[in-house]
Amino acid sequence: MSDVTEIIEKQIKKYGKKRETLMPVLQSIVEKKHYLTEDSMLEVAKNLEISAAEVYGTASFYSFLDIKERGEFVIRICKSITCDMKGKNEIIKALENKLKIKFGETTPDKKFSLLLTNCIGWCDKSPAMLINDEVYTELTPQKAVKIIQDYYKK
Amino acid sequence: MINLKINNISVTVEQDTTILQAAKKLNIRIPTLCYHEDLCVAGNCRVCVVEQVGNKNLPASCCTPVTQGMEILTNSRKVRNARKTIIKLLLSEHDADCTKCYKNGNCELQDLAKEYCTEETEFYIDLLKDKNFTIDMASPSIIKDDSKCIKCQRCVKTCAEIQGVSALTAAFKGADMKISTFFEKSISEGVCTTCGQCINRCPTGALTEKRYINEVWAAIDDPTKHVVVQTAPATRIALGEELGYEPGERVTGKMVTALKQLGFDSVLDTDFAADLTIMEEGTELLTRLKKALVDKDPTVALPMTTSCSPGWIKFCEHAFPEFLPNISTCKSPQQMFGPLSKTYYAENKNINPKGIVSVSIMPCTAKKFESDRPEMIDSGYKDVDYVLTTRELALMIKQAGIDFLKLEDSKYDPLMGVSTGAGAIFGATGGVMEAALRTAYEIATGREVPFENINIMPVRGMDGVKEAKVLFENCLPDWSFLNGVELSVVIAHGLANARQVLQSVKDGKANYHFIEIMACPGGCLGGGGQPIPTSPEIRQKRANATYEEDMNMPIRKSHDNPEIKQIYKDYLEKPLGHKSHHLLHTKYLKRKKY
Amino acid sequence: MAKSLKKIDIIFIPDSECPYKVLENSIKKNKEDIIQNLIDSGLRGRGGAGFPTGLKWKFGAKAKGDEKYIICNADEGEPGTFKDRKILSEVPRKVFSGMGICAYVTGATKGFVYLRREYKYMVPALEKEIKIFNKKAIELGLNFNIEIFLGSGAYVCGEETALIESMEGKRGEPRNKPPFPIQNGYLGKPTIVNNVETFVSSMMVCKMGAQKYSKLGTQDQHGSKLFSISGDTPKPGVYELELGLNVADFVEEFGDGDTKAVQVGGVAGFCIPRKKFAEQIIGQGPTTGGATMLFNSSRSMYHVLQNYLEFFVEESCGQCTPCRVGTQQLLKGIEAVKNGNKAPAYLDELVKLSETMKISSKCGLGQSVANSFASIVENFREEMIY
């Protein structure tokens, strides 16, 4: 738990020990540890002196504060209408085949999670997806698979 | 001042008054669901929407302040249509099989459905069948049934605002939004204090108490069992509300008769045990004071706090474990009664304690948790077998076909059935303090407390935190060390207030000798097992009844109770004696803070 | 370019001088004059709600408080909208300049850019620019600095009070209004929340002057606006166009020759069918966020509506009954009609339900579902049934 505590203390140092610091704290933990575990949320509760239930209630509200186990690289394919029209289903199928998981799941080696997300603001270059913070646009099934292959090399 | 019209009737109100409050002034009832007098305004159920002339949207009356010249219609076609739609939406995500529900007949959603939906033919699509909802029955005190939740968030706000515990939260968003605990664990696993205040404010059957009615019937029906029942001080001044009376009616005598008619073998009184608690706790306080003032013992834990509220105890174990030594080692009256019913009472009546079933009627849900605490077996058996709330008792009375209003009064059975005004006031915030002072002061000085009619007014009332000071002078020789001591006491009710008091002691900002803490607003009279609804007005009426009960008792001080004198003479010997330590005192344990 | 479609280049053309020059000049002017200029320009908010900007800044200046905040709403979550992405990538200095002018006239000392999580890739570049701005502010003697606050993925946080709740570390549940953020906003203090494009346009108004700006556009929709155009179009992208355009001309310019419907204002906006193109003006009534999506005849409007409703069902904050439950009923309802479990007449019940949601929901999300729901069901009814 000490590395999570370190992350939390760094944010508290920057923003102060108050409720407003909760979002930066949760975001930092997700950034470094990929998702929020029960223990890490308890650690947040302890350090910010907020009830654990409130930490959970706040975290679970936001789509990018994952409370389910996620892999090192979280793929989020946009499913809003323009990306849908431009072929997101083919992208999903291609990646499901490549990674051998269904969307919503994480690969057994914990390298990739495959999720769907709502409009990420790249409708002019759809279909689009995020992998962690990086944006990938004008996708084709082949392009998407190639991007994943390149990630394996990382 | 603001002038406005509601349904074409003019009314003048102060700035910041809401439409709902202004309508109330005109005796116009606007239906609500998420609104509650005890809580900050939510404005999320939207049942209270009204039409405002000139506004294309319907404002929610509970959270919209009035403006000059506003024209409101509470019963236009648009409003009725919107209300009906919203109620139908709520019903579509609700298990509406009322016949199976504990809240049948006392459910705010049911009331609205009755008012708006009886002529409806088309309802919306059932949303429940595709959802995975849970019914959490793991807690000994509280059942959480998500299939009945309408997401008004009253429980969340109660636990946060009134109790300062926040064991509940709204979680997720959209269609997945629900009321949850930390990581959706059972409420029995977190920091829930089992106080049941959430149950008191839940408009539907989503939160109810764990019921033991069937178990108690089984014990009564079993000819091999001797069933003993004790009744809390706060039950007798509220039970009537479930059976046809207005709040504030004292129904003690009728309650005893009903219990006898239900088939309990012996109807005894928790108030007796309350008097016993005062003897033990008063002596304990004076002992600690002596250790501090005479022996100058630095290890003695002061201030001392009361220990009769199990919600408070669990709260302290979670949130302020450093204060555990400060809590009186006395068990609560319920838990003092329990072991005595299987030892003192059993021996006196020559009954094998193995065959005794000890039941209590409580205004409380935490008492169910308390009776289940593993250490509560000092009699050699489970000291209190079942705890029923005031609500459960009322249901049993109805099931038995007893016409409560027509009952004659009866008296409690002897041995543990005589009590005093001091015992009776345990049900109100400040009551334990007042009872303790009436005895402690007289033990130390030989005189009655210096308040008119021994009514210690400064400790009474509904302020969240009350302070008082009592000067001890001209004490009896044994207690001369108290001469000149101004005993400083504080009373808190509602756990958010308790937290505030403890924090101030922790921060060194306050110096008290004795602290009374009740988990529930108003004290036990506002407990999690009391009739629903609750409101400041209802709790005040119950408090008035409590002090009326006190004034009408022939004996008003615990140490004057003849049955108390008898139990010490015949059985316990003296307060804090060997037998008392074994049966009437307990330990606490540290629990997780988060 | 079609006749009524005048493309303007105000926002994205590189300026001859740094936008901070406008800031520098503005803080030498009288505060009331700046505000009046903004009011005279007729500029309305560019995020979707369309509140008159000058009026908002006027209230902000009047608001009593020792601390005031400026928040730039960069939560751009409306499907089909991506103009703020382009602004923040290409001309962030115009945004900060606008925020600086706002801080000057209102007395705010702290500014935030509430950046949606999906745009996190922008943070390094933006932080560089913010550092430059903060330094410039000190140089100019303006007591105001900006920092980024990152969102965490919630469409509803584009609503100003939900945004503020999120900044306070809570669930993004919109608040009751009144009180408005101007009186009681971030941490209970007066807070001015404006969209990214609004700050840019405000700065342009300060630069050009109200008269010149208001000459653009129409009687009740002044100025220019950015449109995010996507879908069945050969030229998706961000275009700066004068307001008051005719949809038919728009389709002529941006359609693929087979346009069946145009969604104006994102999924929270209206769907305009081919037969109404000629009579419809874009942006009639309150300004929209400018998200415009084109659908050709290969698209199933049932599928489109289903996609919209799935979005609303997920993104509703969940606190108020009409939206939380209503969105689910609308989605299940059209699915039931489509697979024959409910009669086609049930669609009328659903439209009525959406109308009730419109007038009784707690915030703009629930209130705007009816826009696309009613317009699609009424104009493409056959597609809902067969």
Image: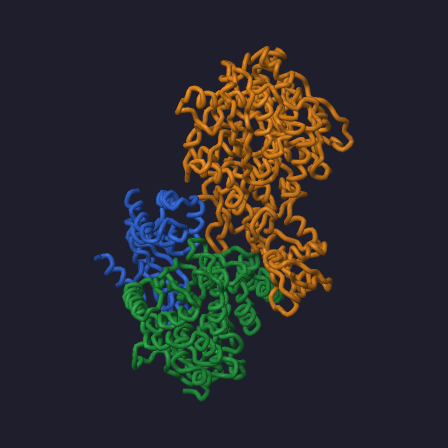
The green chain is C
Residue B238 located left or right of residue B310: right
Question: Which tint is chain B?
Answer: orange
- How many numbered discs sit on the rendered protein? 0
The answer to whether residue C332 is seen in the rendering is no
Q: Height in image: A12 above or below B327?
A: below
Q: Dividing the picture into quarters, in which one does residue C367 lie?
A: bottom right
Which quadrant is the C terminus of chain A positioned in? bottom left
Residue B536: horizontal and vertical position, in percent?
63, 43
Residue C292: horizontal and vertical position, in percent?
44, 75
Which quadrant is the N terminus of chain A positioned in? top left
* Closer to the camera in the image, B30 or C237: B30
Q: Residue at x 59, y 45 (%)?
A: B202
Residue B101 located left or right of residue C117: right
Residue B341 located left or right of residue A134: right
* Closer to the camera in the image, A23 or C344: A23
Residue C160: horizontal and vertical position, in percent?
47, 63
Q: Name the colour scheme.
A: by chain
Q: Height in image: A39 above or below C110?
A: above
Q: Height in image: C1 above or below B519?
A: below
The answer to whether residue B149 is seen in the rendering is yes
The blue chain is A
Q: Residue furthest left?
A: A153
Residue B461: horizontal and vertical position, in percent?
61, 38
